[in-house]
Image (tube, rainbow, N blue to C red):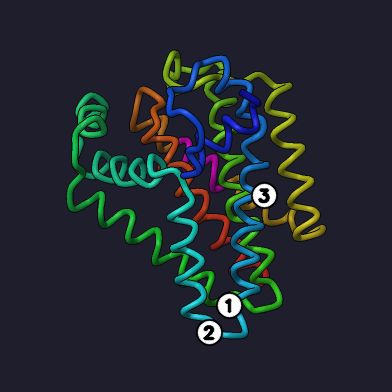
Amino acid sequence: MHPVVIALKYLTSFQFGKPKGFKYEELKQSVPFFPLIGVFLGMLLVLENLLFAHLLPKEVVSVLILFTLFVITNKRLYKGAGYVSEAYFNGKNSTQRESIIKSYPFGYYGILGIFFAIILKYSALNSITDEHQNQMIATMPLYSRWSIAYLAFSTSLKGADSLNCDRLFPKIDFKEFSVATFFLVLGGVLTLGIQFFLIFVINFIVTISGQFILNKTFKNLSDSIIGAFNEFTEVSTILTGFILIW
C-alpha cells in the first residue's frame, strides 16, 4: 500500500479497503506524508467555507467546519485528547496516568478537555477576519499533522525525558522529518505567504512547550498521546493565527 494511502487511513476516517492494522515499517514510511493529509483536510474545509459563507451566518459556518473536521478525523485522535486530559488531571504519577490512558471510557476531565479545545477553536475561528479565515482553516490541519511527524522525529533524539515509542509508533530520522517539513513549508507559504514563518516560529515554541509537558507527564508514546498532541497543535495554530492576523 502506498505511504500516502496509509497516512490517509491513519489520520482520517476514510477507511476504504479491507480493515487491517498498520505495520511498523509501513507506518514509518507514511509519516513524512502526514502534512499532505493536512493539506487535503484543509482543502475540504476551505471548500466547505466557500460554499456556505454566503448562505449562512459566520457562527453557523464555523460550527459546520469544526463538525466536518471532527467527522473526517480518525476517531483515535479525538479519543486520545480525552484520555490524556483525564490522565493528566487524575493521575498522580506516570504509571497511574498510563493506566488511565488504557482504561475505557474516560470521565469528566476527558469530556471537559475535548469540549474546551473545541470552544477555543470555535472562538478563534469565528473571530478571524473573513479575509484571513480560509488561510487559517487550511493551515490548522496542515501544521497539526506535521506536528505528529515532529513528535516521531523528536522521540528518536536521545534524552532522559524522551518518550519511549518502541513498537508503539515509529521513529523517523532527519531525512524523513525534512521531507515532512518541506511539505509543511510549501503548503504554509502557498497558503499564508511570508506570514507563515512568523506563525510557524511562535506556534513551534508553543509546540515544544506542549511536548515538554508530555515528556514530563508520560513515559510511552501512544495513539492517545498522538491524538492529544494533534488536538493541542490544532488549537495553538488557530489561536496563533487569530492573535497575529485577526
Name the N-terminal-most of marks 1 and 3: 3
Q: Secondary structure at mark 1?
A: helix
Q: Residue at x 55, y 26 (%)?
A: 152
Quadrant the C terminus occupies: bottom right
Residue that numbered label 2 is attached to: 56
- Residue 98 in the figure: left or right of residue 46: left
Number of other residues with Cα within 10 Å of mark 3, as a class: few under 14, some 14 to 19, many 20 or more: many
Q: Nearer the viewer, mark 2 or mark 3?
A: 2
Per the rendered image, the range of residues in magenta is: 206-212
Number of other residues with Cα within 10 Å of mark 2, as a class: few under 14, some 14 to 19, many 20 or more: few
- Residue 88 in the figure: left or right of residue 246: left
Which amino acid type is shown beneath numbered disc 2?
Leu
Residue 39: give x, y in percent of width and height: 67, 49
Residue that numbered label 1 is attached to: 52
Residue that numbered label 3 is attached to: 39
Tell me the CA gap for discs 1 and 3. Answer: 20 Å
